[in-house]
Amino acid sequence: MIQRYAIAQRLQVDFDQLSANHSSSSESSSSRLSVSSLEENRNRFKRVFDSNKEEGETLDYAFETVRREIRHQEKIGKSTVENFYYGRGDPKYTTVMSIMRWVDSKEFSGSLDNNAE
């Protein structure tokens, strides 16, 4: 729980810095940090997403499945999940947090499954 809070805090700081620097034409170290943090989360999401995708399942169906699972908690569209997966656009902080909560739940349930074996 503390680790999740620390990650959320770091993401908030990174997103705040990115927003502040977005209007600036020069790229500072803080915006690179933000991009790196976002990329780290995107890679973690892709790893969990790919490992949860059933064999033979289309990506379109898998994106819709993730959207439905996240939507139980918060409103999110399939295209938002797809865009995050492919790194398109600049996602909102709340979107990243919603997606990362899904990742946490999948990683946690996966660790429980591994411990049960």
Image (tube, grey):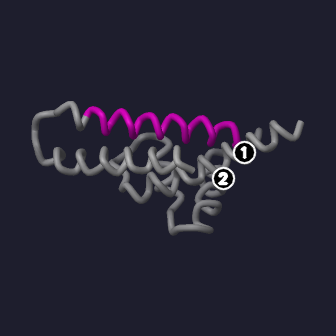
Report the residue at 33% width, 48% height from top. 90
Residue 41: x %, y % from top left? 47, 40
Task: Tell me where residue 74 appears, x and y as whole percent.
Answer: 53, 67
Mark 2 lies on a secondary structure that is helix
Label 1–label 2 contact, CB within 8 A: yes
Q: Residue, x 67% and y 47% (percent of image)?
A: 106
Q: Which residue is mark 2?
A: 61
Magenta run includes residue 23: no
Instruction: Tell whether 15 sits left or right of 4.
Output: left
Identified by mark 1, the residue type is: Glu
State the predominant SS element of the stretch in magenta. Answer: helix
Which of the 4 quarters of the picture holds residue 87?
Answer: top left
Residue at the extreme left: 25
10 Å crowding of disc 1: few (<14), some (14-19), many (20+) = few
What is the three-letter code of the residue carrying label 2?
A: Tyr
Mark 2 is surrounded, within 10 Å at the Cα level, by few (under 14), some (14 to 19) or many (20 or more) other residues, namely few
Residue at point 46% right, 54% down?
97
Q: Secondary structure at mark 1?
A: loop
Q: Is residue 33 magenta?
A: yes
- Farthest residue, direction front: 2
Q: Residue at x 52, y 49 (%)?
A: 100
Pointer 1 residue: 57
Magenta-drawn segment: 32-53
